[in-house]
Amino acid sequence: MSNEALVRSSLQIKKGELDHSTRPSSFRADVAGDGGPTPGQITCTTTGTNVDLSVLATPGLCRIQNLDGTNFVTVGIWDPETEVFYPLLELLAGESYALRLSRDLAWEFATGTGTIGPETNTLRIKADTASCDVLVEAFEA
């Protein structure tokens, strides 16, 4: 089959003189495997919590929701070899976003020579001031 997933998005901002709206857009996407939603609800700490996507052969569509009513979380990539966190997304209290995870999420890349992985780079979520519950629903690509 094809076109098993439907993704919708839009953005509206009204503040002072700024009045911006995007037309709601949607697209259909293929989902090759049956894996997901995974891993489900996890508790993210201020030092960061790795998101276990090991049940997926290839990560694909994903929805991340901050279930905390007060604190924000930061989503990014953790490189355990260098112990560096690369922040990418910030979810304020209650926010939720859909995205497609890269099929190369776990790979490490070297300057000028392409990939040198697969390594153990992973999706990681860090809470700001206190631990937060976050819902991660990732699916097979």
Image (cartoon, rainbow, N blue to C red):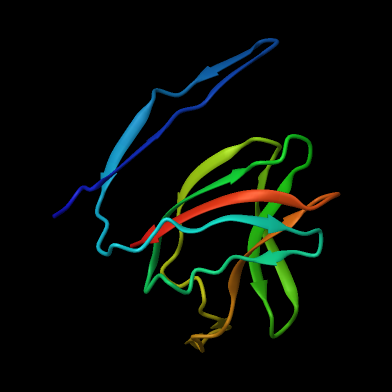
Say which residue appears at 74% left-offset and 43% top-offset.
72
- Give x and y (percent) for residue 66: 64, 43
* Number of numbered discs visible in the structure rendering: 0
Q: Is residue 113 left or right of residue 70?
A: left
Q: Is residue 73 left or right of residue 128?
A: left
Q: Is residue 137 left or right of residue 128?
A: left
In this view, which residue lies farthest toward the top? 17
Give the image quarter of residue 50: bottom right
In the figure, 6 relative to 60: above or below? above
In the figure, 25 relative to 66: above or below? above
Give the image quarter of residue 56: bottom left
Q: Is residue 77 left or right of residue 102?
A: right
Say which residue appears at 49% left-offset and 68% top-offset.
53
- Give x and y (percent) for residue 33: 27, 64
Q: Looking at the image, which is closer to me, 16 or 51?
A: 51
Q: Looking at the image, which is closer to me, 60 or 42?
A: 42
Q: Quadrant of the C terminus?
A: bottom left
In the figure, 115 relative to 71: above or below? below
Say which residue appears at 74% left-offset and 64% top-offset.
48
